[in-house]
Image (cartoon, helix red, strand yellow):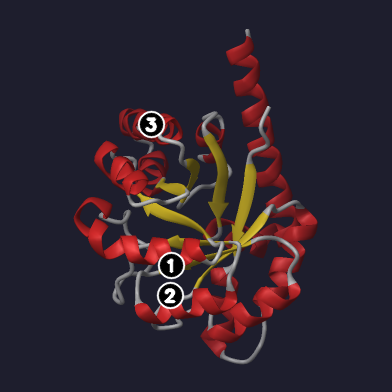
Amino acid sequence: MQRLRLGVNIDHVATIRNARGGVHPDPLRAATMAAKAGADGITAHLREDRRHINDEDIDRLMRHIDLPLNLEMAATTEMLGIALRHRPHACCIVPEKREELTTEGGLDVVGAANALRPYVDQLKSKGIRVSLFIDADPSQIEAAAQCGADVVELHTGTYCERFNDGDEVGVATELEKIASGAEQAASLGLEVHAGHGLTFESVTAVAALPQIVELNIGHFLVGEAIYSGLDSAIKRMRDLMTRARQESNGQQSA
């Protein structure tokens, strides 16, 4: 059974720090704690407006953490230069709008393929794995493969919204899209990740999908840490993911 990896996004540790200024809480300390609690990687989104993670955070993370760093970035010249200078383990290209509270939906790879391909090529030329954050749409998955991406991260935000609303029909519909998308992406040779909005309650069904090899979760874990501590929140999420995958594997073998 393939281990399902957990990438912990530490953006919103920086959000809390920036709300008051200063140096506390420290995203690097959160990354170190995440590693000890069982995270397999660290994700950080360096936005154009530096609303949470900043350049110094990326510098420090690259110098001091042992886990792979997944740098989320928009496809801009500035972000490309930063990525090529630091050479993180991976870069996940995401859509970015200044006015949004959080990433809203996936990239339009179909419409932006010609613009995205040079970014993918330059990142890969430096040994950086390239992921594209997309909706589980067949045409977007096909376009991601044609762009030369190594990985697709399937957007789970709509699924989580339906889950939180108690919309059972909507949950089933969105989960089927994710499952079909994961199967299609894997068949095209893409590594499949997923993330956005996942909680203790909603993660199980996604974690059970066999083609998905990594989940990236941040905001919920940082919020839950207020009540139980970051270590406890990550360990519980890690356990839920592992059990979901084990149970899924057992059902497939039966």
Residue that sits furthest to the top in the current view: 254
> Along the polypeptide, which appears first: circle 3 or circle 2?
2
Q: Which residue is mark 2?
A: 80
Q: What amino acid type should be assigned to the residue bearing mark 3?
A: Gln
Res. 8 visible in picture: yes
Cβ–Cβ below 8 Å for labels 3 and 1? no
In depth, the one of 22 and 164 nearer the eye is 22
Res. 229 visible in picture: no
In depth, the one of 233 and 249 nearer the eye is 249
Which quadrant, please, contains the C terminus? top right
- Horizontal and vertical percent for residue 187? 43, 30
* Badge 1 element: helix
Answer with left or right where residue 233 lies relative to residue 104.
Answer: right
Please name the residue shown 31% across and 62% down the image. 116
Q: Which residue is mark 3?
A: 184
Please name the residue shown 41% across and 39% down the image. 163
Cβ–Cβ below 8 Å for labels 3 and 2? no
CA separation, marks 2 and 1? 8 Å
Cβ–Cβ below 8 Å for labels 2 and 1? yes
Q: Which residue is mark 1?
A: 122
Q: What amino acid type should be assigned to the residue bearing mark 2?
A: Leu
